[in-house]
Each structure stands twice: as C-alpha cells, then as structure tokens.
Image: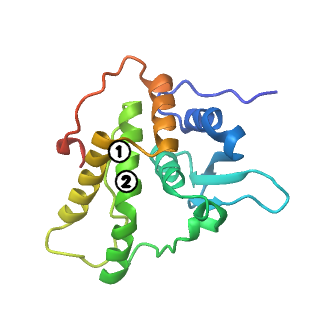
Amino acid sequence: MQAVRSTCSFDATRLEDVFARCFAARYNTRLEGGYDEPLYRPHPADGEAAVILYREDYFASALHEVAHWCIAGDRRRRLTDFGYWYSPDGRTVEQQRAFERVEYKPQALEWHFARACGYRFRISRDNLEGLAVSPDDGEGFKRQVQRQAAQWQSHGLPERAQCFVAALRREFSPARVHVPFSLAELD
C-alpha cells in the first residue's frame, strides 16, 4: 500500500517526489526527511542509493540539502556530508567565517529553489548562540548570497540545479512568470 501524500502546498514529501523524478534513476540518490540533523550519505559499497537526509519534515531544510547536493561534484558526492565539517550553533568568529565562505553558494541556490516553488526564503547564518562575526550583523554574508544568486540568474544555474528548478516550477507553480532578481527578496 502506498503512503498517502498530504495536499499541503509546501509538504516536503512533494520535494522528495520531485527529486526522485529528476535524479533517482541517473544518480541513484534519494531525498528523505524525518531526521534530527541533515546529512548526506554516499552510496554504500553494495550499490544502494545515496541519501540526502533533511531535518524533520522541514521544506526549507529539504531545499537547502538539495542545494548542497547540486553543487557537490563527483568527488564530494562520494564523501559523507560531501566532506564538509560542521560546527554546531555557538561557533567562534573564525568558525563562522569559514562557514559563511562555503555556505553562500548553497543558500543562493536554495533561493532559486524556493523562488521556483513560491516559497519564502530566509538567509541563515546558522549560529544563533555564537559570537558576533562582524559589525555588519550579517549584511556581508547577505550580499555574498545575493551576488551569487544574481550571477546564476544571469549566467545560468549548474546543470542539476537547473533540472530541479524546472521540475519545481512544474510541480508548484506552473504559471509563475520568470522575474528579475531582487535583493529585497533575500531577508
């Protein structure tokens, strides 16, 4: 018996279905929610599917983890969590800067995904209990995300990301008109 899918507009299981239609056959990878923390598990030696795990049933978490996967190259997709380190909330200034140096691209891509669904995107510095990184209170990071999103808007998304955006538009908002990037949308 197949599980009944919710009709809620932003039900994350719909993202799992869209991801499967786009990538399951070609990349033997699936998207799966319900976890305490996100994680990417590469293909085990026995050829089972790689799995992108996202938090709980959070739509935004699913979009964000797919963004990481779409950016990761072949080598990184063979590594647990794409070979990245993760320091939990409460990072030092240096740890936060290192986080932001690698995180602006996935968040820029997540913006494109959210936009394709008509879902509200929020930039996350993911460090609520950490030290202040700079006097700009995250404005520099916000500008990095904006610049990268605008660059992809002008020059095209990475191949897998473009495939996912097109599928998201078909699934969530087929009549949505492609409009220019606006910094005001990134908050």
- Where is the N terminus found, in terms of image quarters? top right
For the residue marked with disc 2, what is the amino acid? Gln
The reply, left or right, for residue 180 in relation to residue 105 is left
Q: Which residue, given by chain and number where applicable, does mark 1 sit on?
A: 111
Q: Which residue, given by chain and number where applicable, does mark 2 sit on?
A: 107
The reply, left or right, for residue 92 in relation to residue 132 is right
Q: Which residue appears at 57% of the width and 50% of the height?
A: 56
Q: Where is residue 116 in the image (x, y as percent from the top left)?
A: 39, 32
Q: Where is residue 150 in the image (x, y as percent from the top left)?
A: 26, 46
Q: Which residue appears at 68% of the width and 47% of the height?
A: 29
Residue 127 visible in this rendered orientation of the protein: no
Q: Distance between the residues labelled 2 and 1?
A: 6 Å
Using the image, determine if residue 82 lies above or below residue 120. Answer: below
Total numbered badges shown on the rendered structure: 2
Q: Position of residue 126 (x, y in %)?
A: 37, 64
Give the camera-side residue of 137 and 152: 152
Q: Where is residue 57 in the image (x, y as percent from the top left)?
A: 55, 45
- Badge 2: residue crowd in 10 Å (few <14, some 14–19, many ≥20): many
Using the image, determine if residue 41 lies above or below residue 175. Answer: below
Using the image, determine if residue 45 lies above or below residue 149. Answer: below
Helix, strand or loop at mark 2: helix
